[in-house]
Image (cartoon, rainbow, N blue to C red):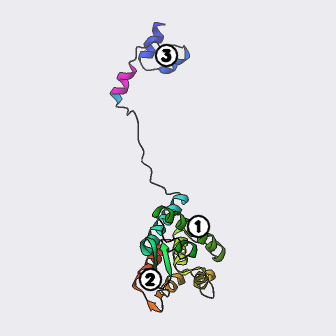
């Protein structure tokens, strides 16, 4: 037994395990760990990965803020530059305009519903794959210019549905008139939509 213990203290741990004498040496584990400077924990920083759902949300939120900025909020009816009676965030629905007053909270809900409806229409009209930002650029354009103009924008030889993505930037800038006049606000709005499109 003395020989085994002597061998163990000399560093042969296999004999210790074989004879079940692992507890025999007086080994200070804490002291040993301290001597070896073993870290208690290692923190590994991983690069941030943005899930597709998060990217969709980011694009959607940015698009909504763009629309709110250019439409502005009006709690009471007014005449837009094109001569239409308008209320809230650019709502021209007669049933809303006739109410004569609306608040921001309700307007935000109405806007969200309108934009989701437009998103569905885009899915039906556009035949090619779109990134979240590209789709949001078209949602913003359609909210301002209506579905008929969306169809004109994307349909026909050499346009989006023909696989020509670059045509969108050029064609968007043709929709800058209201009441027969080029409006600075619409020019800026189309530029903002082009920027959204290019983020894709």
Return the mark for residue 38.
none
Q: Are marks 3 and 2 in contact (CB under 8 Å)?
A: no
Dot 3 or dot 1: first in sequence order is 3
> How far across and down, in percent of the image, does residue 93 sit?
56, 75
Q: Quarter of the image holding residue 138?
A: bottom right
Which SS does the magenta portion mostly show?
A: helix
Q: Which residue is mark 3?
A: 22
- Give the extent of the magenta segment: 25-34
> How far across and down, in percent of the image, does residue 196 sit?
47, 73
| Front-most of residues 164 and 114 | 114
> How far across and down, in percent of the image, does residue 4 sit?
48, 11
Q: Which residue is mark 2?
A: 186
Return the mark for residue 116.
1
Q: Helix, strand, or loop for circle 2? A: helix
- For marks 3 and 2, give the CA distance: 82 Å
Q: Helix, strand, or loop for circle 3? A: loop
- The mark lying in front, picked from 3 and 2, is 2
| Front-most of residues 196 and 177 | 177
Q: Residue at x 65, y 77 (%)?
A: 125
- For marks 1 and 2, give the CA distance: 22 Å
Q: Is residue 140 magenta?
A: no
| Front-most of residues 89 and 96 | 96
Q: Residues within 10 Å of mark 2 (few under 14, many from 20)?
A: some
* Vertical comparison of 62 with 34: above or below: below
- For marks 3 and 1, give the CA distance: 69 Å
Dot 1 or dot 2: first in sequence order is 1
């Amino acid at each position: 037994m003395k020989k085994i213990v002597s061998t163990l203290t000399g560093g042969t741990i296999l004999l210790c395990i074989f004879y079940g004498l692992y507890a025999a040496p007086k080994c200070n584990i804490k002291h040993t760990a301290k001597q070896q400077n073993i870290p208690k924990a290692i923190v590994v920083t991983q690069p941030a990965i943005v899930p597709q759902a998060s990217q969709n949300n980011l694009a959607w939120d940015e698009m909504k803020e763009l629309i709110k900025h250019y439409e502005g909020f009006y709690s009471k009816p007014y005449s837009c530059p094109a001569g239409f009676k308008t209320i809230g965030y650019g709502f021209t629905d007669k049933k809303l305009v006739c109410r004569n007053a609306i608040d921001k909270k309700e307007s935000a809900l109405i806007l969200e519903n309108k934009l989701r409806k437009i998103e569905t229409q885009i899915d039906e009209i556009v035949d090619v794959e779109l990134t979240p930002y590209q789709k949001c650029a078209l949602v913003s354009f359609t909210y301002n210019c209506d579905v008929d103009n969306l169809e004109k924008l994307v349909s026909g030889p050499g346009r989006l549905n023909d696989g020509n993505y670059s045509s969108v930037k050029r064609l968007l800038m043709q929709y800058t008139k209201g009441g027969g006049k080029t409006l600075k606000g619409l020019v800026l709005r189309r530029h903002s939509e082009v920027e959204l499109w290019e983020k894709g």
